[in-house]
Image: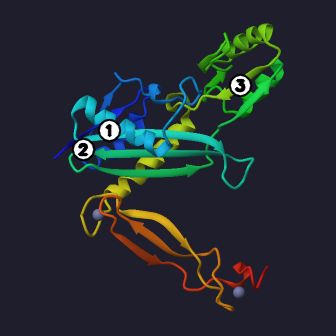
Amino acid sequence: MTHEIAFLTCHQKEAVVAPILEKQGFAIRVETSFDTDALGTFTGETPRTLTQVQAALKKAQLATELTSCRFGLGSEGSFGPHPQVYLLPWNLEVLALWDRLEEHAVYAILGTSDTNFATEKVSSLDSALAFAEKSGFPSHALILGTPADSFFSKGIGSSAEFQERVQAALKVSPSVWLETDMRAHMNPSRMRSIQHTTEKLSALLHSYCPQCHLPGYGLTEMIKGAPCEICDTPTRIPRAEKWNCLKCDFTELHPLNELAPAKNCDKCNP
Ligand SMILES: [Zn+2]
Ligand SMILES: [Zn+2]
């Protein structure tokens, strides 16, 4: 039996999402009538009020309301510096699948440094071209200016257009803001991240809660504190994985490391 999943997207994400979920008996129904940018955009034309996970869920719920499908899918990406390695760019992708009948959400979350995310303020055509070069342009599109600028432009994907627009902008402003366009249809790296997130979602849909039998049962937290092999002090090495059902709160601890090597112990190896 095939279940329809309503998906609100104007950015052609269904190209990578549909083939994976179809294998699990879901058919993707794309809804482009609703402008998802109204919930907030990457370039800040509309400020965001929800967290990333809440925004993905909101889109999934809206999709079911607008279509009367039982299932809805919401996608939300964010970009910034890597949480530990500051100079590395980082892409966090969230997919939320909402089941309106069970009032149950399954979330797939993926963090990756496989992204071209970058921003730069430039004051010459040469530095603009250097930025384009290292940003994977023209296969990955660029954004010129900010929404407040008269020359603001998104989705620039040709070298001739980019040069023209930069030159025109530099005539009216001493410096211009450049940004990689992270919308999926403008950015093959982003599309790949969404594909990998869908694969994660697909695996979660095969994982059922032992108590309430709804899908999406999986790892929610790494429990730190495996004891040092010499002095027994708790370390930062994980001692267990916590698996948790978001619907009924059933929880299991899967042990990982009974002991941690002394080199990870703050007492033995400060
Ligand atoms: Zn459960
Ligand atoms: Zn120790």
Q: Ligand 1: does it lie within 8 Å of the C-beta at label 3?
A: no
Residue behind mark 2: 100
Q: Residue at x 67, y 83 (%)?
A: 261
Percent coordinates x, y for residue 266 in the rendering: 74, 79
> Where in the image, quadrant-wise, is ligand 2 located?
bottom right
Residue behind mark 3: 178
Circle number at residue 61: 1
Q: Residue at x 59, y 78 (%)?
A: 225
For label 1, the SS is helix
Marks 1 & 2, CB-CB < 8 Å contact: yes
Percent coordinates x, y for residue 239 in the rendering: 54, 78
Tell me: 66 left or right of 57.
left
For residue 216, what is the image quadrant?
Answer: bottom left
Give the distance between the C-alpha atoms of the residues marked 1 and 3, in whole angstroms: 34 Å
For label 3, the SS is strand
Question: Relative to 224, does residue 205 appear above or below in the rendering?
Answer: above
Tell me: 111 left or right of 58.
right
Amino acid under disc 3: Leu
Question: Where, quadrant-wise, is the C terminus in this rendering?
Answer: bottom right
For label 2, the SS is loop
Give the distance between the C-alpha atoms of the residues marked 1 and 2, in whole angstroms: 8 Å
Between 261 and 83, the one lying in front of the other is 83
Amino acid under disc 1: Gln
Between 197 and 218, the one lying in front of the other is 218
For residue 217, what is the image quadrant?
Answer: bottom left
* Neighbours of disc 1 within 10 Å: few (<14), some (14-19), many (20+): many
Task: Tell me which label, 1 or 2, sits earlier in the chain.
Answer: 1
